[in-house]
Amino acid sequence: MKAVLAAGWAGAWLGLAAAAALAAEWPTWGGDPGRNMASRETGVPDTFEPGRKRRDRLGFDPSTARNVRFIARLGSENYSSPVVAGGRVFIGTNDEDLDDPRIEPTRGGVLLCLDERTGQPVWRLVCPRLEIDRSKVSEDFDDMNLGICSTATVEGEFVYLVTNRCEVLCLDADGLADGNDGPFTAEGEFSVPAGREPLELGPADADIVWKFDMLRDLPVFPHDAANCSVLIVGDHLYVGTANGVYDGTMVLPTAPSLIVLDKRTGRLLAKDDGRISGGVFHGQWSSPSLATFAGTPLVIYGAGDGVCYAFQPWRAGADTSPALLEQAWRFDCNPPGYRDRGGMPIDYWALVRGGPRDLDRDGMLVSPSEIIGTPVVDGDRVYVAIGQDPIHGPGRGALSCIAIGGHGDVTETARVWQYTAIGRSLSTVSVADGLVYAAEHAGKVHCLDAATGALVWIYDTREEIWSSTFVVDGKVFVGTRKALVVLAAGRERRKIAEIRLGTPVWSVPTAANGTLFVASQRNLWAVSAAK
């Protein structure tokens, strides 16, 4: 029976991988369940002209752009990456500067659905700011005008998303144009703050199929933002809850960090045992990935305690409801010495507030870090970096290459290599042609040999990086505070271009159907070679 189950899971995984390899779409964070920020697209231009700036809502003159098919206006903040599926582009933003007289901005979030060819709006989801008693909790969550930070996941006719209010939504990819399919039918009330009159909605609005409220139904409390990109494994959704600090120092200590939902109904099926939350330093912003070992899938999760976990996928038949996820292994991504000093635990919050500081020989702070980027699966290895919220300043990071397999604590046995000559990172890595490209927050892009961890080259952008590297068509794209930087992929360090887009590039570019999609804080460009 176990062999049959393993074969079935392996078949499901191979089917997903084959579909991702053959399709020219980019339907989720990282393009497929392995989350590798590398695309097989070709014909993507080395550079483009975004157009001359002008004083209108769009902000750029499309007639003066080069290698640009369209420019679309977002809100005033963008941290969600574009995904492309079914002829549509889906991207999150905030509700500031929306071109919709019905909607009064509330510092809330918006998911835009755009036509892939023209960039014209198809429909939008509006998610007002969360209504909570802010005298009792930190104002860091849903109060920073960040909007929807989650990168959507699209499968067939459904779109899965985590909102700025820490809800998991299943949306109809066609919006309300084909009617309200339900069972959720209160979209008009959902789209306005509590106590307001419901909006009159139409074909240009979102159709919510079901909703699961993690904040109230688990419960959890995120710090800064809830931005997980949902992972689909068969009929199940794996979602990071974003549980973190809620009043400056406290974390809900037994709240789950990873949950499993039925993708058809949104019913809670399983969760981790809550022990991760007890060790969370600050927040949790990573997304789960999918790997295989000996033909059996594993769900990989980078947690807010700085540990990379592998869980056995949930299977029906458990005695408890919701069931507890079974942990396969764990790997501490903080190298020796990062967590302690002279045998004494480091007070993380004292370090943040300027208390005792352990400095490495190059002057960089050594302290425990969480996993912010998403673990990337490539073959039988996982690549994952550690870092901290940028407000905590610069410090020593680490990039780990982990062999998939083993049981229990595999920190020593599964370490293939560990690279510590990198600063703290918010980024997910790219693996392509035997090389790993990793960005650190302080602005450097590191190129390493994927097999050995040996340094190949470093390029310093000299600007903050909140984005991730993205490899496509022999080029490495990475967003910075000032520009989109384009480097040559490969063993020779070479800068190709630096493109100023008017505002920072914090999200990660994506590529689909021969087009590169690049978002700044305010605009989305569809970049393709001139015909």
Image (spheres, rainbow, N blue to C red):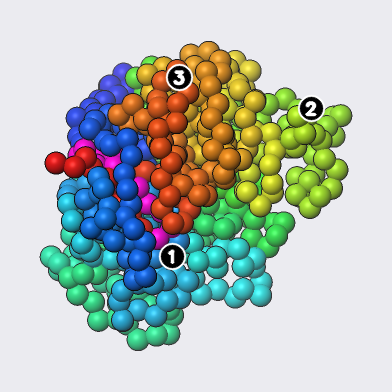
Q: Amino acid at mark 3?
A: Glu
Choose the circle earlier in sequence order: 3 or 2.
2
The residue sitting at 45% across, 61% down in the picture is 77
Residue designated by label 1? 76
Residue designated by label 3? 492
Where is residue 248 drawn, in percent x and y? 70, 60
The residue sitting at 19% across, 75% down in the picture is 202
Where is residue 500 drawn, in percent x and y? 43, 50
Q: Element under label 3?
A: loop
Residue 523 vs 526, above or below: the answer is: below
Q: Element under label 1?
A: loop
Q: Amino acid at mark 2?
A: Arg
Where is residue 512 drawn, in percent x and y? 24, 40
Choose the circle earlier in sequence order: 2 or 1.
1
Give the extent of the magenta segment: 511-522
The CA distance from mark 3 to mark 2 is 29 Å
Q: Nearer the viewer, mark 3 or mark 2?
A: 3
Front residue of 408/74: it is: 74
